[in-house]
Amino acid sequence: MADLANAPKPSSSVKLVLLGEAAVGKSSLVLRFVNNDFQENKEPTIGAAFLTQKCNLPTRTIKFEIWDTAGQERFASLAPMYYRNAQAALVVYDLTKPASLVKAKHWVAELQRQASPGIVIALVGNKLDLTNDESTSTATTASAENSSEGGAESNGADDSGDARKVSTDEAKTYADEEGLLFFETSAKTGHNVTEVFTAIANAIPETSLKSARGGAGGGGAGGGGNAAHGAGRSEEQRVNLNGPRDPNAKEGCAC
Amino acid sequence: MNDGDSPPSLSGSDLLPPPPLPPRRIVSSGGGGGGGGGGEAHLQVAPAQSKPTTAVTSIDISTLSFPDGSRGTFSTSGGGSGSGSGHGTPPNHRVSSDLAADSMSVMSFAATLRPPGDLASLITGEFNRKSPAWMLLRSQSASVPPFQGVRLDRVNGLAGFEREFDDIPEPAAQGAANDDGVRVALWKSKMKHYMILSSAGKPIYSRHGDLGLINSSMGVVQTIISFYEGAKDPLLGFTAGDARFVIATEGPLYFVAISRLGESDSQLRSQLDALYMQILSTLTLPTLKNIFIHRPSTDLRKPLEGTESLLSSLADSFTMGSPSALLGALECLRLRKSQRHSINNAFLKMRSDKLLYGLIVAGGKLVSVIRPRKHSLHPSDLQLIFNMLFESGGIKSGGGENWIPLCLPAFNNSGYLYMYVSFFDTDNPENPSSTEPPPPPPPIQEQPPPPGSLDDNDDQIAIILISPDKESFYDLKDMRDKVAQQLTKTGSLAIIHAAAKLGRPQVSSIAPGAQISHFLYKSRANVQFCMPSLEPAFGGGGHGPEKLVARRKLMSLYHQLHASMHARHSHLKVLHCVGEDAASLAWITPVFEFYCVAGPNISRAVMTQGANKIIQWAKREEERLFIIGGGVF
């Protein structure tokens, strides 16, 4: 259909789900990524929010279809609905709350057990702005090994005004064991946020994009509807064309 | 003594053409006036009264002029005569709930200085406008807007109301010894409290103060309630000082409202009921029951986690005064009939198979509803949805589309429905797709808007699609995109935008010349209401505390009127009250409920005339103001 050279880069949709305990900053991460905005004291998400954002890679464009789920316990039973068919998951914990890492590990286990095989999972420790290692935190990227930060830091942190309770090492070790991407971020400052999504986009294998699009396409059809540009969307549009017929037929029946 | 000054009477047909309000039969200005009672209770005038009565409605109510110049209004239900004469109340006396619960249903409040009434028109000329004499006279003029006196803040007990919604500060880190004392004092200064606790005494929610601060108060409340529970004589309410306590027990939960704002018991009770509905909406009734059957000492805060802001925004809208909650009715966006029709049709045409209810809402005002023939939507359910969408920030601020499981208790309290919500992009109405291109960052909110805002220019438009199928998100999203496309194409979206931006009309444009400052009109059949803009009379000059207080004064007056009209056994049809700072009129027929407020010096004749104009307007505009039936499939 489209020439790679001249036409817009091939774009594909990726379904991504955010999971994690309440109040770790899932919505704030998304808000930072999608709108480059931050709200103090954001009110809790109810149910789930659905947002989209494009991520431009050198060879292609990834359109993230993001499911930002509510972290409260009572919504946990709905989670499978959101991670089913997801190609990527962002499991978020609050690095000032050790319990939230425990919860994150539960989510990772559940994803590995129940989600589609080959799902790309990123473990994200949020609220880095509450720690006092932000000056050095440029090193705290996916590949960085912060050997300087020992496990002792979680104990001795308080007197220095550092709220960190989960050491980078601890989380990083766990992420490596489970084969997860790992980042520490601050949705407040924006630190590392885009990097998370870019890394996920890069980690998704080309092959899964093709096959997965068919799967997600049926559901995600008509996402933008009217905007329609690029050959990559023709498939979705075809689905869209079928759409209006049904309601019309229904209307005929009702009258 | 102004004996001769019988109220500028409705029956005085020589002065003005008799306004059709109120509906009445034979009125004899001099006598008891109960003659035409037609089988209903007859008027009984207390023998001590030397002055004749003037019937307002010959059937239900009559007004007395007392020798001291005040007036009393009686219901004519039997047995009321004895107490009636005792209730010529001083100015600014509040209708307290215990009085309302008495057989005595209603009283009217008279200024000590009689207003010159219709004479006011003689002095409204341009001349002498600035002379001191004029200024003196002006204070007696009928055109004085309501609530002008500054000192009335004190009288009405609204001093400090502007700080009602401020947070009680967190305890200081290593706080001084008296820090808690200060915080408790702050807590006590709030005029309205809502508390929810379990029957085992576990605190669940309190509007003000962290639970640590008020734990002991919660304990006292629990002890008092359970004492009466134990005696099989549940406590419903009590008064302490100027605060009214009302208690509602719902299964394993106690709901307590503490108010110094003068609401009636039944009004407070319905507010508590709304909080209960919010909890059910989160948990469903079977879940709530199960939780407490298995473990009566469960801490319900965990399952309700994240909904505190919904409870608080609901509570705050009551504290600010919500016409919608008071009347148990919804407000609609005023649109031409043909426009609403075409929106309904577009909505129906694009309907997804999975849809149960579809709504389009602009700034808390209903634009369009589609529903199955056999199911209607209950106002209390919609109140919960509107509260979630427009009063609390959780949904709005996130951007994107939302998929929310919720229980609509009045529809079915045992299961969840799934609600798709998407806000149309207000900045760019021509391109309502929120998915592509990504919307520009929303304006950063400096401060959360005041709760329960009645701002006229709140023009955010949301589409709400409700389905019983939890997997139907993409179907409904698809439907939304099609509806948005259609509405954009036909220009309906722009019309909705314009109508929402226009806000509510001012009284002066509804009934030119009427000296009414504000009104509420509820269409009883449609369970919907309409009201004019709060500006200019209750705007208090823009935003901020004045506006908050001005609005609360108005709403308190409406609450009093409403309480009087709906007091048990009162069977009132019409009520006219004159106070030192405002005059008000309430009128209930099988078709509508009407409440209006004007300056204190307005004569009753002028007021009824104005009321009639407004009611005629509402009748004329009925299909614009209200959604009648909606789209049914």
Image: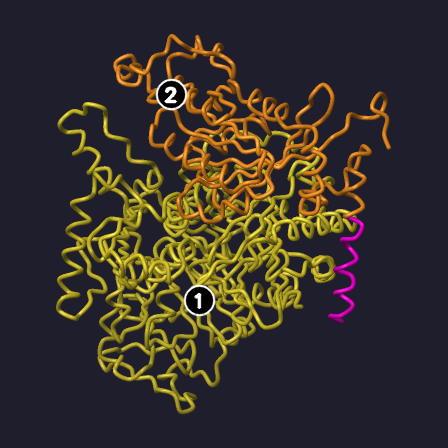
Q: Which amino acid does the dot numbered 2 rest on?
A: Glu
* Magenta stretch, overall SS: helix
Residue B562: percent from left, percent from top: 39, 64
Residue B136 visible in the displayed image: no
x%, y% of residue B89? 26, 64
Residue B435 placement (x, y as % from top left): 67, 38
Q: Which mark is residue B504?
A: none
Amino acid type for the residue under numbered disc 1 = Ala
B384 vs B287, left or right, is right
Q: Which chain is yellow?
A: B
Corner quadrant of residue B44: bottom left
Query: Which residue is nearer to you in this view: B504 or B515?
Result: B504
Q: Is residue A248 magenta?
A: yes
Give the residue at mark 2. A170
Q: Nearer the viewer, residue B55 or B597?
A: B597
Say which chain tag 1 marks: B
With B70 as the anchor, is B60 left or right in this view?
right
Q: Residue furthest bottom?
A: B39
Q: Residue at x 14, y 56 (%)?
A: B223
Q: Quadrant of residue B19?
A: bottom right
- Classify mark 1: residues with Cα within 10 Å, few (<14), some (14-19) or many (20+): many
Q: Is residue B254 left or right of residue A28?
A: left
Q: Which mark is residue B586?
A: 1
Task: Select label 2 or label 1 by which is in front.
Answer: 2
Colour of chain A in the image: orange
- Span colored in magenta: A240-255
The quadrant holding residue B602 is bottom left
Q: Could you say whether the residue bearing mark 2 is in a helix, strand or loop?
A: helix
For mark 2, name the chain.
A
